[in-house]
Amino acid sequence: MSLRVCDVTTKEAGCRTRVLASSSLLFVLTVALHACVDDQPADDPGAGDTSGDLSSDGVEQDGVGDSTARPPPEPDPWALNEVAVADGAVIQLVAEQTMLPILSSGDTELLAYNGTVPGGPWRIRQFDDVNVDFTNLLEEPTSVHWHGLQQALVDDGVPGLSHPPIEPGQGWTYHLNTDNVGTYWFHPHYNTHEQLDRGLYGAFVVEEASPPPVDIDMLWVLDDWELDSDNQVRDTFERHGDRTHMGRLGDVLSVNGMTPYRAALPAGALVRLRMVAASNARTWNVQIPEAAGDAALVARDIGYLTAPQPIRDVFLTPGDRAEIVFRVPDEVGAALTFYGEHYRLEFPKAFASFIVVENDRPVVEAWQHPVVEIPDYSDLLNTPEDLEIYIDATEPPGGDASLFVWRINGRSFNESMGVDTPLATLKTGELMHIRFRNDGGYNFGHPMHIHGQRFQVLAVNDVPVDNPSYEDTVWVPPEGTVDIAMLPDNPGIWMLHCHILEHVELGMMARIDVVDELPPPEGSAAQDASD
């Protein structure tokens, strides 16, 4: 496997193949309240006119006269720039240092994709052919992991498995697997705990050709920041206490890189709100305002639930995604305030608010949930698990915290496993009942993420889940258990790890191999013959 390199300083000819794509403005995010509706008239002659330019989101703009290009939607006063990616597009993505105002009191030095936090966002049609041409302009190596996509191993973005680390000034082209609808995100898988916490992440949507109609389709990327008195990210990434306890927790909460997040919503609108939890360690128990009518959870990590689930809060762990729908109240001037609560911090904290503004447009009457066919694997709960994954930690001899490590099935990735030792080898097409068991002590939960595959959660602490969906990240509660059903269908070498990134630094990562044919058992005649 060779690393395709382009020297960005000399712009080596023929290094990359670029496909011209079309772009438009979609009503997905909201306009911050300071950019009031009256300041953005719908008949702005420049709105939506992007043909022939390179957008800030990195997709080359053309599509004039292209019969495959999507027509631009009407400009919407509650819209931010989200690029609609055409079939066959090559997205140009650059990791770089930048200065952005997380707080209104001054700029913060960050790492970012294409100069924005979050990077993107993009809207991609299901089954479309899309590539991402990535260039590293950081001062250290990096990579891009496409969290939740069932990528080919070469496109998964894990240095040492997918490709070598991408050095400064080098690049790599990733192909995106768009088979499954859902809300996804991307981030480094090299020095992840620091690069991600400094802002290096982005998000995108893969949607079906005809998604359920809504008035507003929004994407929130949730994060927390540990800033000093000069609004700079604290350079405290090697604190051992973060690695042995709850991880790095910031006290500044942001939505789409904005603190505080304030926005306007039209009265009576039906809103689809997609949320991505991009924090290193913070869990988000998002409390939905009572004034937000008919709130329901409609999708998790990789697509829809079997049916809408009425809710007043939704729990997201690092790496998680969730989609809710709700109705904006009719009362103009009403406020909708969202609160978030960490699972071990006792007080909720406001992190986002909307104000209701006048709406002279007709609204969508009701959410039309798609017909979802998800296999029923609940009978697996009546059978012994095929694989148990247990999480614990070493007890440091003599209380020496420097010797503490997290372990999966008795082994720490940093201590003894390495990438050459699989935790398990699974066969494609062979349904697996897998049980996570959290014996880690210390009353800490762990969000466990599996690369390259998807699974259903069957039960939590032996309580069956009756409204399944496909997921890639699951919260294993303190001293608790989670049963999942996984049908491996993507051969490769896949990482399994806690998405509290500081826990990964102390070993909570393992490797699972998925193969088309299992090797013969050790000591068997078949193995002797193969030797």
Image (cartoon, rainbow, N blue to C red):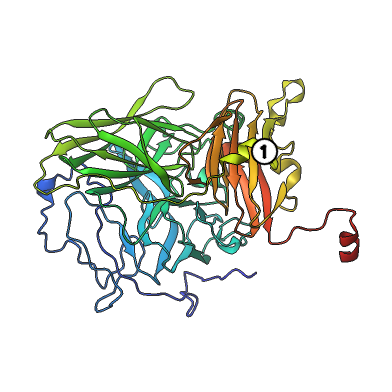
- Residue 119 in the image: state x and y as whole percent: 39, 53
The residue located at (15%, 40%) in the rendering is 267
- Residue 483 in the image: state x and y as whole percent: 60, 37
The residue located at (41%, 67%) in the rendering is 128
Quadrant hosting residue 478: top right
Rendered-image quadrant of the N terminus: bottom right
Q: Is residue 18 left or right of residue 213?
A: right
Rendered-image quadrant of the C terminus: bottom right
State the residue in front, 239 or 311: 311
Mark 1 — residue? Answer: 383
The residue located at (24%, 48%) in the rendering is 216
- Is 385 located above or below residue 47 in the figure? above
Q: Is residue 210 left or right of residue 76?
A: right
The secondary element bearing badge 1 is classed as loop
Mark 1 crowd level (few <14, some 14–19, many ≥20, 10 Å Cα): few
Residue 229 in view (yes/no): no
Q: Is residue 181 left or right of residue 394?
A: left
- Residue 215 in the image: state x and y as whole percent: 21, 49
